[in-house]
Amino acid sequence: MANSRDDFPQRVKELLGNRVGWRCSNPDCRKPTRGANDDPQRITNIGVASHICAAADGGPRYDPEMSPEERKSAENGIWLCQSCSKLVDDDVIRYNVGLLQVWKENAERLAIAELQSASPVSTDNTDIDRLRFFVQCFDRPAFQDQIDQEGRMEDFDQAIEDTIIAMNTGVLRTRDGMIIKKSEGKSTIINPVWREKLNTITDMLVALRKRLKIAKDEKLYSTYGKDDVMYCFHDRELKNWFDLTREEIIKILSSICQEAGIPSLHFPKQRYRW
C-alpha cells in the first residue's frame, strides 16, 4: 500500500535540526536533542522534525491547500524534542500554525546569536541592571490583561509604542511624555544572546501594533459597556493571537531573567476559546 503521508526526506530533517543547533525550538524548553551515547559508535537523538501543517489528512493543523512538495519542505517543518512534539500535536488550538512559525523563526535567530558569541554567557552587572529596567517596562496592564479586558485601544497602542521606545532608547515615559525611568537601550546589552532575544521581543511588539492597526481599519472589534471602554473581538482567532503573542514576549523575557538570576514577570494563564 502506498504511503499517503508527505514525510520529510532525511536531508530536510538534518537541515531543520542543524538550523537550530539541535535544540528544541519551544522557547520554554530549548533542550539539547543530540549528544553522546555510551556506545562510542553511536549518538543519542531525542529530537523530531515535526510538521507545522500535518503530513496527512486528519493530522494536526492539516492544510488541504498545500501541495505534497510544500508539506514535506523545510518551510513546513520545526525541530522539537519528542515531548514538545507530542505537546503541540495534542493541543492544536493553543499551538497553532502562527505560533509554531514564531517559535521556528526565534529558535533560528537564537542559534545565529549563539554562533556569534565569542565568549561565555555574560553576567555583567550593567546587563543585569538594564534587564531589571526592561522588566519594569513590561510591568503594566498592557502585558497583564487579556486583550478584550483592555481599556481604550488607543491607550493599549500607546503603551506598546512606549515600551518599544523604552527598549530602544532606555527611556520609559508616561502617556503625557513625563520620564518615569532611565537606563540604556537594548543595543548596549553585552551578552549577544540576551541582546538577540530583546531584539526579537521588539520585533514582536512592532507586529502587535501593526496587527492592531489592521484590526481597527477592518473594524474587527467593537466597543461596549459604560463609556465604550470594553472591547469585543469579532475574530476569536485574532483575539487569541494578541494574547498568545504577548504571552510569548513575557516568556522570552523570563528566559533571559532566569539565566541572569533575577525576578521576572508571568503572563496570566489564559483560556483560549474558539
Image (tube, grey):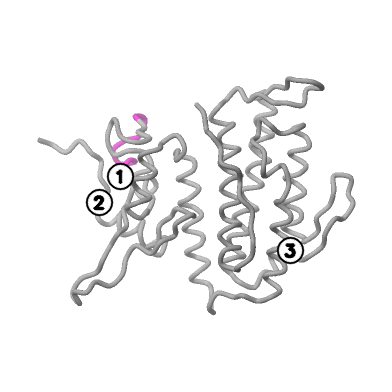
**Amino acid type, residue under disc 1 in the picture:** Lys
Q: Secondary structure beneath disc 3?
A: loop
**Circle 2: residue type:** Pro
- 246 vs 98, left or right, is right
Name of the residue lying farthest toward the left? 1
- Crowd around label 1: few <14 · some 14–19 · many ≥20 (10 Å): many
Q: Would residue 235 be found to the left or right of residue 206 on screen?
A: left
Which residue is at 69% across, 66% downward?
187
Q: CA distance from mark 1 to mark 2?
A: 7 Å
Query: Cβ–Cβ below 8 Å for labels 1 and 2?
Result: yes
- Badge 3 density bin: few <14, some 14–19, many ≥20, Cα 10 Å: some
Q: Residue at x 70, y 59 (%)?
A: 134
User: Which residue position is annotated with label 1?
Assistant: 72
User: Quarter holding the N terminus?
Assistant: top left
Residue range highlighted in magenta: 64-71
Q: Is residue 185 magenta?
A: no
Q: Is residue 65 shown in magenta? A: yes
Residue bearing the label numbered 2:
9
